[in-house]
Amino acid sequence: MNPSPFSRRDFLWQAGGGFAGIALSQLLMSDAAGALPSPRPDFNGGLHHPAKVKRIIQLFMNGGVSQMDTFDHKPELARLHGQKIGPKEKPEGQTGECGAVMKSPFEFKQHGQSGRWVSSVFPHQAKWVDEMAFLMAMTTKTSVHGPGSYMMNTGFLLPGFPCMGAWISYGLGSLTDNLPTFVVLPDSRGLPYNQKGNFSAAFLPSKHQGTIINASAAQPVPNLFADKKYAFAGKEADAASLALLQKMNRQHASAHPDDSRLEARIASYELAAKMQLSAPEAFDLSKETAATRTAYGFDNPVTEDFGRRCLLARRLIERGSRIVQVWSGPQGAVNNWDNHGNIVTELPPIATSVDLPIAGLLGDLKSRGLLTDTLVVFTTEFGRTPFAQGSQGRDHNGNSFVTWLAGAGIKAGTAHGSSDDLGFKAATGVTYCYDLHATILHLMGIDHEKLTFRTSGVDRRLTDVHGHVVPEILT
């Protein structure tokens, strides 16, 4: 017999005709199935070995960054400019036939003691190359935006799999109980390809999915506070509602003393209430110094949006969020990195919008000592062709692109791998998303082969059956 006729399960069962009770049972079973050992203090917060990284800021350039116009200097393109030597048939994922070889219209120079080549579209990031490690031969299995974005975020081409942020949240848990563990800061102009699918927890418990925050909105977290027209929904009403919910939860727990799964669920229900106190302070950028705001590009409308989100990412990881994604570009044919029409006119504006903010972020993290346990990752879903599309555009190319990492555990000023002479295909030191994910998990104290979740009779993992750590870029 239940200790009260108004138990949580009875209430849900009666209110929802039984379906709500079934849903509650399924949620609780999912939490139990996802149970993992806690990160170990003797492993510096790692799960399987000592961790060098506690927090991640991931900068995702949506649309496909042209590698030979940014970080992959290819002098051979100038020599072969105008020659028709590309594939005769249109490759999978490309939107048009391959045109003639097209040299980069942007000047490349060597920077830093490492001598890393960077084009003129990234003058501010160029100053930080000695802090970065480059993966110069990234590749993927597709040249289509949706599958490519899924693969770089979840390790699979198809929807229905958890993203890296969800896996990290599941494996390591939170660093604080009053901010989300995994936060997504999309472009103010819209979500990327796949919409919210890139941030999904899929078959992992839903509490591990990304919390989407619109940094440009008056209320970055919608519905955190009641609308002013509902005057009765104040602090007292919130407290009363939480008290009733707690009572129902505890009654359910006392009726099932051998089932401790509810405790974890209760904590997740309380996050929103705790955010009412912590989120306003975290999102209040007005307290930052004028110098800091300038460093992130607040004084320029071109850089202000991405700069605002980079600064918010720093504030969130500083206060306990474990992974924050900052996206550049919405889905669609404009305002992103999908430069089909004219690389000369389309690439500089989007590159300018992120370049100064990224440099500002790196400088801010370093000056505050946060790079000692924070990892910054810059990537995209694929690259672009060395062959012209139309007159001066570049088409999709999953064969080669560039990723860089900076911060904790990274061997600064290094590079691994190379593409062919045209930058068309990865040639040496080839790395997939599996290897990038395995390396990131390794830095966080996780063995990518041991971080698993059983679903539909299969032990799934972020890296599927692939992946290796890339030691060449690690200290």
Image (cartoon, helix red, strand yellow):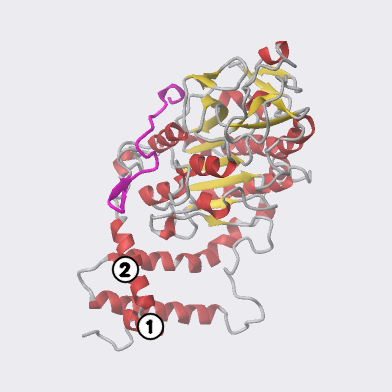
Q: Is residue 469 magenta?
A: yes
**Residue 190: horizontal and vertical position, in percent?**
66, 53
Nearest to the eye among marks 1 and 2: give it.
Answer: 1
| 139 or 188: nearer the viewer | 139
Asked whether 314 falls inside the magenta stretch, the response is no
Q: Is residue 141 visible?
A: yes
Name the quarter where the N terminus is drawn: bottom left
Q: Which residues are magenta?
A: 452-475
The residue labelled by disc 1 is: 17
Across the whole image, how many numbered discs are drawn on residues? 2
Which residue of the protein is positioned furthest toward the top in this rendering? Answer: 79
Q: Are marks 1 and 2 in contact (CB under 8 Å)?
A: no
Instruction: Left or right? Give the position of 473 relative to 41.
Output: right
**The residue tagged with tag 2: helix, strand or loop?**
helix
104 over 458 or under it: above or below: above
| Residue occupying the point 23% across, 74% down | 256
Residue 475 position, x and y percent, is 43, 25
Residue at the image point whose x is 63% and y is 24% from the top:
71
Q: Is residue 179 above or below residue 228?
A: above
Q: Which amino acid type corresponds to the residue marked 2 in the rendered image?
A: Leu
Q: Residue at x 62, y 82 (%)?
A: 230
Q: Quadrant of residue 67?
A: top right
- Magenta part, dominant SS: loop
- Residue 460: x, y in percent? 34, 46
Residue 320 or residue 61, whichever sits in front:
61
Residue 370 drawn above or below residue 112? below
Report which residue position mark 2 lands on: 262
**Where residue 405 is drawn, which disc sits there?**
none
